[in-house]
Image: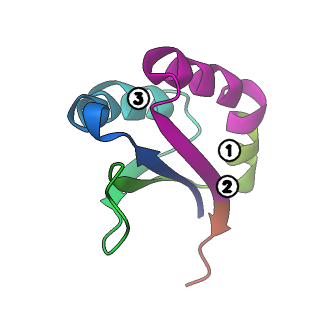
């Protein structure tokens, strides 16, 4: 299994609306690409939250090929949709991980 991890710093003024959008719209859209089987939302603790909370969203893919398909076909669209909705009110750092145990 592969985990596509997106760590996000979200501005305080959008955090509640953003989290609702993430749960109700964005994650279902990501799952509906067919590239991921499920997703988990985590909030980082013991971080500097003065400017807003930090979250990690982990999308699970059964194969590297499914992740590659997401990157090739859907990543640009999904990132643009997020930017169109929230502008510069968040920053994101992305990584891919392989489960070894």
Q: Position of residue 81 (x, y in %)?
A: 53, 18
Could you say which quadrant of the image residue 56 lies in? Answer: bottom left
Q: Quadrant of the N terminus?
A: bottom right
Q: Which mark is residue 63?
A: 2
Check contact, mark 2 vs mark 1: CB within 8 A.
Answer: yes
31 and 20: which is toward the camera: 20
Q: Give the residue number, with chain letter if any, for mark 3.
A: 26
Label 1: which secondary element = helix
Task: Pick whichever, 55 or 57, lies toward us.
Answer: 55
> Based on the displayed image, in which of its 4 quarters is residue 75 positioned?
top right
Give me the residue at 41% from left, 29% from top: 26
Image x and y of residue 37, in percent: 46, 46
The magenta segment is: 70-95
Residue shown at the point (59%, 55%) measured from the top left: 62
First along the sequence among labels 1 and 3: 3
| Label 3 residue SS | helix
Residue 45 location (% of width, % of height): 31, 71
Residue 50: where, in percent of width, then height?
32, 56
Q: Nearer the viewer, mark 1 or mark 3?
A: 3
Q: Is residue 31 magenta?
A: no
Residue 51 at least partly seen: yes
| Residue that mark 1 sits on | 66
Q: Which disc number belongs to residue 11?
A: none
Q: CA distance from mark 3 to mark 2?
A: 21 Å
In this rendered view, identify the residue nearer to me: 9 or 97.
9
Magenta stretch secondary structure, dominant = helix
Disc 3 crowd, CA 10 A, few/some/many (<14, 14-19, 20+) = some
Looking at this rendering, what residue extends furthest in the bottom direction?
101
Say if mark 3 contacts mark 2, CB within 8 Å: no
């Amino acid at each position: 299994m592969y985990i596509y991890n997106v760590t996000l710093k979200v501005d305080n003024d959008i955090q509640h609306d953003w989290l609702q959008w993430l749960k109700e719209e964005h994650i279902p859209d990501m799952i509906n690409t067919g590239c991921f089987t499920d997703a988990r939302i985590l909030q980082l603790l013991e971080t500097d939250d003065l400017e807003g909370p930090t979250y990690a969203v982990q999308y699970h893919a059964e194969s590297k090929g499914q992740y590659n398909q997401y990157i090739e076909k859907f990543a640009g669209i999904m990132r643009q949709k997020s930017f169109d909705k929230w502008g510069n009110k968040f920053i994101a750092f992305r990584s891919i991980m392989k489960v070894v145990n």
